[in-house]
Image (cartoon, coloured by chain):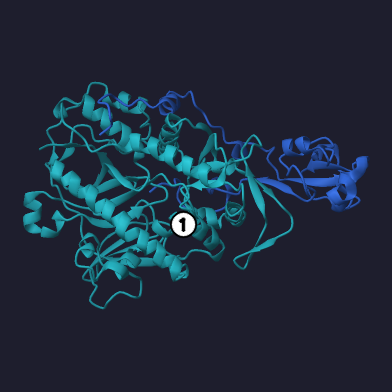
Chain colours: A blue, B cyan
């Protein structure tokens, strides 16, 4: 038995039962959750080879930038503003990279940020609702 | 062990259990007038019976399941359990590291009522039906709702209850996170908690919140998200993982923050096959990778195939075999096994279970499971604590918290298969 003989009132549980703790379903309810890919772009937002943003190239040397965008863009494409998820990120700025969800150092171009890949709401697996046993 | 129908209704009990988190005590479509919670009926146990249940549960865990896990790993029996190759390194690593794990629930067949034991002496001995090691629910009911029922229901005034679940969970978070800190040097100030957004009744959410409350009591910051909102930062180049090409990746929450440790109420066997599964499994092997609670090795214990492994290892042991039912992988059972429960390896909540006696189907539940393989467990019908309103077949659930027996939760059905339409029935100790 519990150490003390008194009712158990769980704070989070009670809050949720009263409707005061709501967890929104971002991916399931939003159209803004498309996969985002980090592209290496030049000053005209034109996609260049990923390696231009690598550490070995001085993280772009002020000429090349990382940009998060939705959609598949090949080298030479100009990323339209409607597909942009971020402004241009200096590849040498580890804080800005981390803020965009990218690795703080090392190669970042080509990295994709995805959601909806775990859970029955993401189309990953089939079956009845509920996961308990 | 007795079943009592002379209980009373606490004034306002329905509102009280909802306020305490049991928002899912009524059927979702409102068609079933019965509450999932049983207010005025209950089971009683003697202190000696409780000690016996605890001792058997600890024996199952310490002396049998640990060895069964070692056996599966040493002999690489993953194919027999339908465990994908890509999951094996994460399973083995988490097993050998004794990765954080807080809870599980044994479902036992037990009915030590003198009248019932007269007819079937085997009911005096607890026997393992299955181990819900990965995603057990009915936690809130067991830890909180039935405890408050005990304190507030006049029918059981001054009685005791076997229920140390919540305090044990708090201690489990404290100990497991301290171990993780010591082993890795990571600070772990915060734990994420997740469940699937598709579960609408609230059962998964409130089970998770119960665990999160215990973590907060242990001084841990908590953050919540649905599994569907977990983000994967996926690298383009693939790497091999146990012969499978996977994208390396790390996990972010809905705000783009790193997920250091996460509790999930979501089956590992589903996660391993989900789109992010291979990357998640790869990530668990990396320094600084996300730590999942329950750990990947729970894929071994929650799999019904472990019941066949247990019987293979301990079926010949005079002492230990008494806590097991003979169980075999489908197709490997002896010819004489004509009475059996066929259970899919990944089955949950009684889904896709079939009971057969002398070649005749006694009961069957539909469901999505079975293509992964099944076991056949010798048929041992649940006891019937028959009441004025018909049959009552209880399954005795013993909660294992941090590897030790910590309390009891009973679900019963009018049918022989305990499924998600069963009721929760509280208990007390009477000497």
Is residue B165 rendered to the left or right of residue B191?
left
* Residue at (66, 51) in percent of width and height: B249
* Residue at (20, 54) in percent of width and height: B126
* The N terminus of chain B, quarter of image: top left
Of residues B297 and A74, the one nearer the viewer is: B297
Q: Return the x and y of residue A16 as percentages of the image width and height.
A: 45, 27
Q: Return the x and y of residue B261 as percentages of the image width and height.
A: 54, 42
* The C terminus of chain B, quarter of image: top left
Q: State the residue lying farthest toward the top.
A: B11
Q: Return the x and y of residue B66 as percentages of the image width and height.
A: 36, 59
User: Tag count in the figure?
Assistant: 1
* Residue at (78, 35) in percent of width and height: A96
**Is residue A133 visible in this depiction of the protein?**
yes
SS type, badge 1: helix
Q: Return the x and y of residue B201 as percentages of the image width and height.
A: 42, 37
Q: Is residue B224 above or below residue A128?
A: above
Is residue B304 rendered to the left or right of residue A37?
left
Q: Chain of mark 1?
A: B
Crowding near the residue tagged with mark 1, few <14, some 14–19, many ≥20 C-alpha atoms within 10 Å: many
> What residue sits right under mark 1 in the picture?
B95
Q: State the residue lying farthest toward the bottom.
A: B335
**Is residue B344 visible in this depiction of the protein?**
no
Instruction: Choose top left, top right, bottom left or bottom right for residue B259.
Output: top right
Is residue B394 rendered to the left or right of residue B72?
left
């Amino acid at each position: 038995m519990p150490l003390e003989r008194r009712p158990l009132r769980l704070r989070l549980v009670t809050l949720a039962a009263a409707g005061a703790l709501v967890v929104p379903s971002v991916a399931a309810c939003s159209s803004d959750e498309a996969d985002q890919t980090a592209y290496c772009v030049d000053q005209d937002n034109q996609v260049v080879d990923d390696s231009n943003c690598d550490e070995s190239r001085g993280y772009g040397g002020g000429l090349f930038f990382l940009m998060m965008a939705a959609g598949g863009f090949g080298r030479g494409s100009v990323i339209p503003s409607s597909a942009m998820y971020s402004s241009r990120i200096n590849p040498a700025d580890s804080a800005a990279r981390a803020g965009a969800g990218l690795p703080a150092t090392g190669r970042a171009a080509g990295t994709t940020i995805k959601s909806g890949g775990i859970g029955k709401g993401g189309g990953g697996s089939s079956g009845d609702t509920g996961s308990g046993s | 062990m007795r079943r009592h129908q002379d209980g009373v209704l606490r004034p306002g009990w329905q509102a009280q259990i909802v306020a305490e988190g049991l928002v899912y005590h009524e059927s979702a479509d409102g068609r079933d007038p019965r509450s999932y919670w049983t207010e005025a009926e209950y089971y009683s146990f003697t202190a000696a019976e409780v000690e016996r249940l605890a001792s058997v549960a600890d024996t199952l865990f310490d002396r049998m399941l640990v060895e069964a896990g070692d056996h599966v790993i040493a002999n690489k029996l993953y194919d027999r359990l339908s465990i994908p190759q890509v999951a094996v390194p994460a399973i083995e690593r988490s097993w050998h590291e004794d990765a954080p794990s807080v809870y599980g629930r044994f479902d036992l067949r037990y009915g030590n009522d003198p009248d019932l034991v007269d007819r079937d002496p085997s009911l005096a001995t607890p026997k393992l039906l299955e181990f819900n090691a990965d995603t057990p629910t009915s936690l809130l009911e067991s830890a909180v709702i039935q405890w408050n029922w005990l304190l507030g229901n006049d029918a059981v005034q001054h009685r005791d209850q076997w229920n140390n679940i919540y305090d044990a969970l708090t201690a489990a978070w404290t100990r497991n996170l301290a171990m993780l800190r010591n082993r890795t040097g990571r600070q772990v100030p915060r734990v994420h908690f997740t469940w699937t957004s598709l579960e609408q009744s609230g059962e998964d959410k409130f089970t998770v919140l119960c665990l999160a409350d215990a973590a907060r009591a242990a001084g841990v910051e908590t953050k919540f998200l649905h599994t569907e909102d977990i983000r994967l930062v996926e690298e383009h180049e693939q790497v091999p993982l146990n012969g499978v090409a996977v994208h390396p990746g790390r996990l972010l929450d809905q705000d783009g923050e790193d997920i250091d440790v996460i509790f999930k109420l979501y089956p590992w066997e589903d996660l391993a096959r989900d789109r992010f599964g291979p990357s998640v499994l790869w990530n668990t092997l990396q320094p600084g990778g996300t730590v999942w609670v329950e750990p990947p090795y729970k894929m071994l214990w929650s799999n019904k195939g472990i019941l066949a492994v247990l019987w293979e290892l301990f079926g010949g042991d005079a002492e230990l075999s008494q806590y097991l039912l003979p169980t075999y992988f489908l197709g490997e059972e002896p010819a004489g096994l004509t009475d059996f429960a066929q259970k899919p390896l990944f089955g949950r909540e009684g889904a896709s279970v079939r009971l057969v006696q002398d070649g005749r189907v006694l009961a069957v539940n539909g469901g999505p499971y079975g293509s992964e393989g099944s076991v056949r467990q010798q048929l041992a019908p649940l006891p019937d604590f028959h009441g004025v309103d018909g049959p009552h077949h209880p399954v005795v659930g013993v909660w294992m918290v941090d590897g030790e027996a910590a309390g009891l939760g009973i679900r019963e059905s009018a049918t022989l298969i305990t499924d998600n339409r069963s009721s929760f029935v509280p208990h007390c100790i009477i000497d």
